[in-house]
Image (cartoon, rainbow, N blue to C red):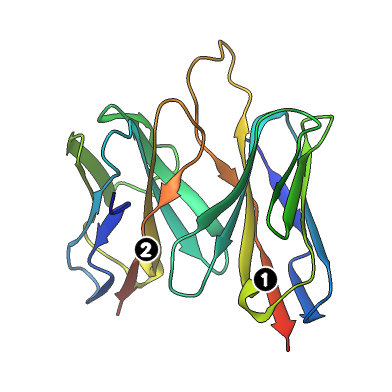
Amino acid sequence: DAGVIQSPRHEVTEMGQEVTLRCKPISGHDYLFWYRQTMMRGLELLIYFNNNVPIDDSGMPEDRFSAKMPNASFSTLKIQPSEPRDSAVYFCASRGDDSAQAFFGQGTRLTVV
Amino acid sequence: GQQLNQSPQSMFIQEGEDVSMNCTSSSIFNTWLWYKQDPGEGPVLLIALYKAGELTSNGRLTAQFGITRKDSFLNISASIPSDVGIYFCAGQPLVPGGTSYGKLTFGQGTILTVHP
């Protein structure tokens, strides 16, 4: 298995633009997580899905952030409009239903200028 | 919500030295995980612990699940330069009803620097 695949690896965008981050979880994994990592706040859980259904989105910072999982093999995290304070590394992770062990993608480094 | 306190925040050691870091929680966890993150990469799972008191080794790494279910430690023996990175503990809270796994809460990380 190729592991969790995220794209793009790097994204630089101007303030106000829409940003879409993509994730392909490990095949067969029922849970998908979106995390944000910054120096100040560490790893923060934004939202997670179980069987494509959002279970907990309490970590989503504000309405500018939205996430979807239209099928078991694809999820997106969208920021619209983006702001400089959104600059961070965004990670997607997945795990199976029979284990707490989450596997992470390589992340998307987002820079909003 | 659950809080994880990880210490120390950073460590500077000489190659060959042993390292110890720990995490404490304000509430009970039923699973503890330890991850390592290399620069520019995502966290990679090192060790998973599922039972209170459990002691598990993975090469030079040893981790334990505290008896109270509120703490865990990770030891690295005979450190080498490639041990450099950020180490995270993560815990899964005890979920009433027990059949479904919830979200992981991460500690703040321990930055490890190993001098040759």
> In front here: A108 or A59?
A108
Report the chain holding disc 2. Answer: A
* Horizontal side of residue A108 vs A36, given as left or right: left
Residue B109 appears in the rendering: yes
Look at mark 1 in the image and give the residue it sits on. B111
- In the rendered image, which quarter is residue A9 located in? bottom left
Report the chain holding disc 1. Answer: B
Q: Horizontal and vertical percent for residue B111? A: 67, 71
Q: Amino acid at mark 1?
A: Ile
**Which residue occupies 40% across, 66% down?**
A89
**Which residue occupies 38% across, 56% down?**
A91
**Which residue occupies 26% across, 44% down?**
A67
* Horizontal side of residue B1 vs B64, given as left or right: left
Dot 1 crowding, Cα within 10 Å, few <14, some 14–19, many 20+: some
Q: Name above or below for residue A47 compared with residue A90.
A: above
The alpha-carbon separation of the residues under discs 1 and 2 comes to: 19 Å
Look at mark 2 in the image and give the residue it sits on. A106
Q: Mark 1 touching mark 2, by CB under 8 A?
A: no
- Farthest residue to the bottom: give it: B116
Q: Amino acid at mark 2?
A: Gln
Which element carries disc 2, helix, strand or loop?
loop
* Horizontal side of residue B57 vs A82, given as left or right: right
Q: Horizontal and vertical percent for residue A82? A: 26, 64
